[in-house]
Image (cartoon, rainbow, N blue to C red):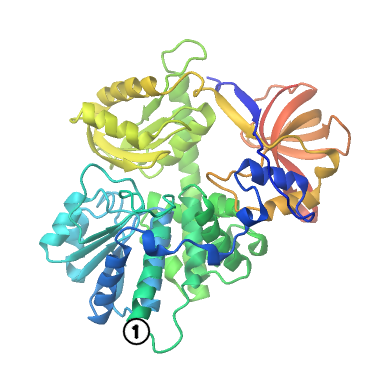
Amino acid sequence: MRPPATRIVRRAVPAFGPWPDSVPAVLQRIYAARGVLTPADGELRLARLLPPDALGQVDQAAAMLADAIASDAHVVVVGDFDCDGATGTAVAVRGLRLLGARRVSYQVPHRARHGYGLSPALVDDLVPMAPDLLLTVDSGIACHAGVAAAKARGWRVLVTDHHLPGETLPDADVIVDPNLGDDGFPSKALAGVGVVFYLLLALRRHLRDAGAFTGPEPDLSVLLDLVAVGTVADLVPLDYNNRLLVSAGLRRLRNGQGQPGLRALIELAKRDESSLTAADIGFAIGPRLNAAGRLEDMALGIECLLCDDPHRARELAGVLEGINAERRDLQQQMVDTAEALVANLPLGEGELPPVLCLHEPDWHPGVVGLVASRLKDRLHRPVFAFAPAEPGSPQLKGSARSIPGLHIRDVLAAVDACHPDLIERFGGHAMAAGLSLDAAKLDAFRAALEARVASLLTTEQLRSELLSDGELGVQELARPLAEQLRLAGPWGQGFPEPVFDGVFKVLQSRLLSGGRHLKLSLLCERGGVPLSAIHFGGGTGEPLPPRIHVAYQLELDDWNGRQGVQLLVRHWQPA
């Protein structure tokens, strides 16, 4: 089944400026289309970072941690098994130690043994550690049973999370979550790692006011490389505040000041540390960390991030590299199966339901989110992918990815309200969510889900659109602009990387090994020189017409010392 037709739509550009002449006109236009209308709007100085004051309950949380440090209490950081949770755990452990905590440990749930977040099973396994205070990172807002189990053992619980709360809250001592009520904190888009970094800022201020520092204050900016990686990898919107955090973290990484574990991962991913971008984090660094939590144990990834010995960090990064290679192979197998399931749906030619709900008994629960994401991108439909919680288990773990205009967690909340016997638990964001349910209830859930989504999405919303920043001039299709675009971000979710469009003549086209990808030589219809282009996943075996309308990104091409440019084709259609 072919994906729905995609329309190339040029972004609206509001009035903007003036900008200095050093900023190219095309970049001014790109910024304006993303809401950056003046140089001041685009200035990414860390001094402009929002203060923690308005973040709800952050002062109470800081006071609790200060008391724990003063009493030499044992603080156990409870992380999560994705990249945001891993980096957040590393930030919490490193930050608390910087601020004077002597007894800090961490534990991360195992996907198969414990399930998500602070669960009763994880609490049982924490007993030998004898914690005094649990600090959750990137989870906890939906962990009612786990928090209750921890409190029953006499432990204090401090929840830091960024996921949307449900109708009721867990009985934690303190909860810090920018999405909890209307607390006045302007940025609701913090990742889990961002929330815990803000808590550390508040804790440092609390200790400063209490006169706890006899020497120089600890420099928490040394943690920003971790904050940047977790923020980008979790695909939270890059609002201005998150762009400040990511930009500062990228500067540290480019200057060779990153944690040894991150530097080792960058090296293994064959990325240029001196010009690292958010895209490098999203496509190379994040997946290597995430792979540990998907297939093995995220404790390995956290150990890599906490390691200060470069030699040992390289060893750990090498293990993560191997796990990631296994993840890639497994992901491709599952995606191929998912595409076959969609192709075999009993529908009319070219029809697709408003939401896809897929399941295979031999899928891996750690990879279903990647399958959902890949099909969502290809088919422009919200996608749910399910796998057994463990081999042979009657319980399914599902992961969902949505499209603009459909808040997927709200959809799950509505289905749960109308059919309270279907979903065991769920949580997430507007664009991504996770859930668990009994396999016997999957068909009933699919029917309820399709009915709900069909009532919310219009035909227009189900048409795929690719937003373009317009056409580039012949002289702009060159390396100087590509270099400026690379470093002009950080680009990411909510602040997308520039995409351009134009008509090109097809000089050559060939399939790369495996037949999945298409290599092209294109010539702008208005002149210039032939341009190398690549379309990942574009290999269909069908010949291209002589003229095509292409949506593309302008990228550097340094392969074998070329020092050229390449068009990364996002979509093409006959001209």
Query: Which residue lies under the disc numbered 1?
Result: 212
Vertical placement of 348 versus 482: above or below? above
Q: Position of residue 356 (x, y in %)?
A: 40, 26
Q: Residue furthest bottom?
A: 214
Q: Residue furthest top?
A: 348
Residue at the (77%, 49%) spot, across then down: 24
Vertical placement of 492 versus 412: above or below? below
Which amino acid is tagged 1? Answer: Ala
- Asked whether residue 525 is in view, the answer is yes
| Label total for image | 1
- Position of residue 116 in the picture relative to residue 325 (left or right): left
Vertical placement of 346 versus 13: above or below? above
Residue at the (50%, 58%) spot, across then down: 229
Q: Position of residue 469 (x, y in %)?
A: 68, 37
Vertical placement of 78 versus 423: above or below? below
Give the camera-side residue of 360 and 549.
549
Residue at the (35%, 85%) spot, across then down: 211
Q: Position of residue 146 (x, y in %)?
A: 19, 54
Q: Position of residue 521 (x, y in %)?
A: 80, 35
Residue at the (49%, 43%) spot, across then down: 329
Give the camera-side residue of 83 and 200.
200
- Asked whether residue 361 is in view, the answer is no
- Position of residue 268 in the picture relative to residue 449 (left or right): right
Mark 1, secondary structure of its residue = loop
Q: Callout 1 environment at 10 Å: few (<14), some (14 to 19), or many (20+)?
A: some
Looking at the figure, which quarter contains the C terminus? top right
